[in-house]
Amino acid sequence: MVKTFLQKIGRLRIVSQRGFTLIELAVVMTIVGTLTSLAIPSYQRSLIKARETVLMEDLFQLRTSIDAYFADNAKYPDSLDDLVAKRYLRQLPKDPFTDSADTWEEVPPEPMEDGTVVPGGVFDVHSGSDLMGLDGTPYREW
């Protein structure tokens, strides 16, 4: 009886000592590392794509506000701050690539064919970022 009891204890030790070998852990870590290295570029690209979408929406809203200001006042705003002061915008959006609302590039109105210039200082707006878009065009030209 003592002998069978010791045999059972020995079996319990063997069962309780089972686990993963170093090779099995190394294989799993290699697979996880490979999957991670494949996923990171896709993740980074999706972050850039999301920023580009925010930039396009911000530019759309700014340009729509400039057009509404012109329709109401028959002149363009002197600065983007006029859009906020006259409540065409609640606040200036931040450029998603420069992370600042102060880096927007304001484009003044160009002279018309007869040489007259519409009053105001902001006809259009562009991003102040020096980076290139995923489509190959600089954000300054959007």
Image (spheres, rainbow, N blue to C red):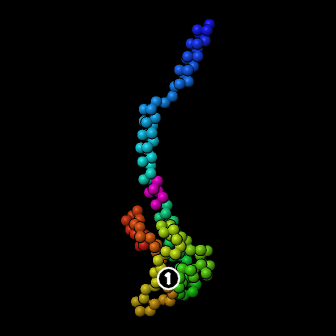
User: Mark 1 falls on what kind of element?
Assistant: loop
Q: In the rendered structure, does residue 66 fall within the stretch colored magenta?
A: no
Query: In this orientation, does residue 79 appear?
Result: yes
The rendered magenta stretch, by its main secondary structure, is classed as helix
Coordinates of residue 91 in the picture (x, y in percent): 59, 74
Q: Nearer the viewer, residue 5 or 129?
A: 5
Which quarter of the figure has residue 16?
top right
Residue projecting furthest to the top? 1
In percent of the image, x 47 and y 64: which residue is there?
Answer: 52
In percent of the image, x 53 and y 24: which residue is there?
Answer: 17
Q: Nearer the viewer, residue 18 or 86?
A: 18
In percent of the image, x 41 and y 43: which residue is there?
Answer: 34
Q: Nearer the viewer, residue 28 or 107?
A: 28
> Which residue lies under the disc numbered 1?
122
Coordinates of residue 77 in the picture (x, y in percent): 54, 84
For disc 1, the neighbor class at 10 Å (few under 14, some 14 to 19, many from 20) is many
Query: Which residues fall within the magenta stretch?
Result: 43-49
Coordinates of residue 50 in the picture (x, y in percent): 49, 61
Report the number of numbered marks.
Answer: 1
Q: Is residue 85 above or below residue 100?
A: below
Query: In this orientation, does residue 55 appear?
Result: no
Q: Quadrant of the C terminus?
A: bottom left
Coordinates of residue 33 in the picture (x, y in percent): 43, 43
Q: Is residue 16 above or below residue 57?
A: above
In percent of the image, x 61 and y 8: which residue is there?
Answer: 2
Q: Quadrant of the N terminus?
A: top right
Callout 1, which amino acid?
A: Val
